[in-house]
Image: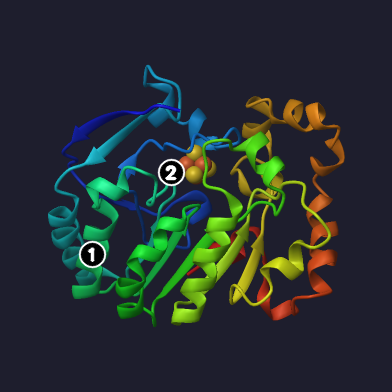
Amino acid sequence: MQQELFYKVPKNILNKGSGFLSGYSHSLNPYTGCAYGCSFCYVRQMPVATFREGEWGTWVDVKKGAAELLQKELTRAKRKEAVTIFMSSSTDPYQPVEHEERITRSLLEVMVENPPDFLFVQTRSPMARRDIDLFLHLKHNIRVSMTIETDREEIRKHFTPDAPAIRGRLKTLELLKEAGVPTQATIAPLLPSSQKFPDLLKGKADRICIDDYFMGDGSGGRRTKNLGIYAKYKELGLEKWYEPMTYQKLIKRFKRVWSEEQMYVSREGFLP
Ligand code: SF4
């Protein structure tokens, strides 16, 4: 999908952690909008998207001067409280525009100089491997979480055709872990996957987190229902995967390969 880029100078860059992220003092979004345009993305229904003309996934705002802003706001925030940051809650920090704009990298450089108490990096992009050098500077107070919703590429294409292929994400996760960066494989939202999925992830991340629409979309599954995602399961004849108890079956499957201490469910996997 083609994106239109806009360059904006934001007034602030750190936002207060709230709702699902209330365990964090702040959230940090290097961009507004997201080129991956996942069909199930609940940000589609938020004011940031509904007040825009173009469809979610077709536009991205680049936050100019983000690093300078963060420098100031981080120093100020650290004087008041322990600063725990979730990057990012409503965009992907490593979407394609980051290749050129390097906003995410510039924010990490600020945090290397002036570390927050904890940083959680959430992405679907293999590009995260570019910043291993910076992650390592923060390795005692960072976790990098790679979303891998399924091991079945045809399922990934059905639900998120513009997101990166699974193979590249797995490779990056492996590289991060090998380098000594604390990692998490985040199966969220869990999509139909194969029996081999737990083995495929084994050894590639320190831990996993399983989440679904019913626990993780911030509205008990209502937002996802409004997006008409059920129809996408029906098209594949896989409606059984769209049920509130499916995550328990997946947990059972993972328990055969992963220890309980390495497994997290929904919000607990995203806490600092
Ligand atoms: S990568 Fe995340 S923010 Fe981007 S469209 Fe997908 S779910 Fe939404």
Instruction: Name the residue tied to disc 2.
Output: 90
Q: Which residue is mark 1?
A: 77
What number is the disc on residue 56? none
In front: label 2 or label 1:
2
Q: In the picture shown, does residue 154 fall above or below 80?
A: above
The one nearer the camera, 226 or 154, is: 154
The residue at label 2 has a CB less than 8 Å from ligand 1: yes
N-terminal of the pair, mark 2 or mark 1, is 1
Circle 2: residue type: Ser
Identify the residue at image location x=41%, y=38%. 34
Q: Secondary structure at mark 1?
A: helix
Q: Position of residue 74 (x, y in %)?
A: 21, 64
Graded by Cα atoms within 10 Å as few (under 14), some (14 to 19) or many (20 or more), the crowding at tag 2 reads: many
Camera-side residue of 258 and 128: 128
Tell me what residue is drawn at x 65 percent, y 34 percent. Answer: 224
User: Looking at the rendering, which quadrant does residue 226 occupy?
Assistant: top right
Image quadrant occupied by the N terminus: top left
Residue 83 found in image quarter: bottom left
Q: Is residue 29 visible?
A: yes
Q: Residue furthest top?
A: 53
The front one of 66 and 150 is 150
- SS class of the residue under badge 2? loop
Q: Where residue 241 sits: x, y (%)?
A: 81, 43
